[in-house]
Amino acid sequence: MGVKRYELNEAQWAKIAMLLPGKTSHPGRNGSDNRLFVNGCL
């Protein structure tokens, strides 16, 4: 399945992923769905 027009592609995601709080490297579940959250907002 391809990227929908309102979702971020890999290059766009790579630019903003580290700017978001709750990264997957942090303990807990707070960063598990940042990409899903951003795509939902778009």
Image (cartoon, rainbow, N blue to C red):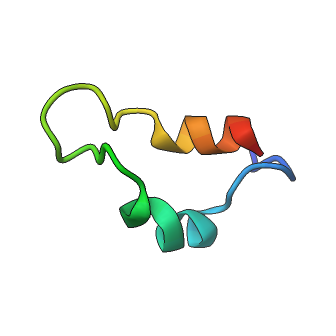
Give the total number of marks visible in the rendering. Answer: 0
In x, y percent, where is residue 30? 31, 31
Is 33 situated above or below 6? above
Q: Quadrant of residue 27?
A: top left
Q: Residue at x 55, y 62 (%)?
A: 13
Q: Nearer the viewer, residue 38 or 3?
A: 38
Q: Name the quadrant of the N terminus.
A: top right
Q: Residue at x 36, y 33 (%)?
A: 32
Is 20 situated above or below 32? below
Left or right of 21: which side holds 37? right
Q: Nearer the viewer, residue 7 or 40?
A: 40
Q: Nearer the viewer, residue 41 or 1?
A: 41
Q: Nearer the viewer, residue 2 or 8?
A: 8
Q: Quadrant of residue 40?
A: top right
Left or right of 32: which side holds 6? right
Q: Residue furthest front?
A: 21
Q: Residue at x 53, y 44 (%)?
A: 35
In x, y percent, where is residue 15? 51, 74
Q: Residue furthest right?
A: 5
Left or right of 42: which side holds 5? right
Q: Residue furthest top?
A: 29
Left or right of 17: which side holds 1? right
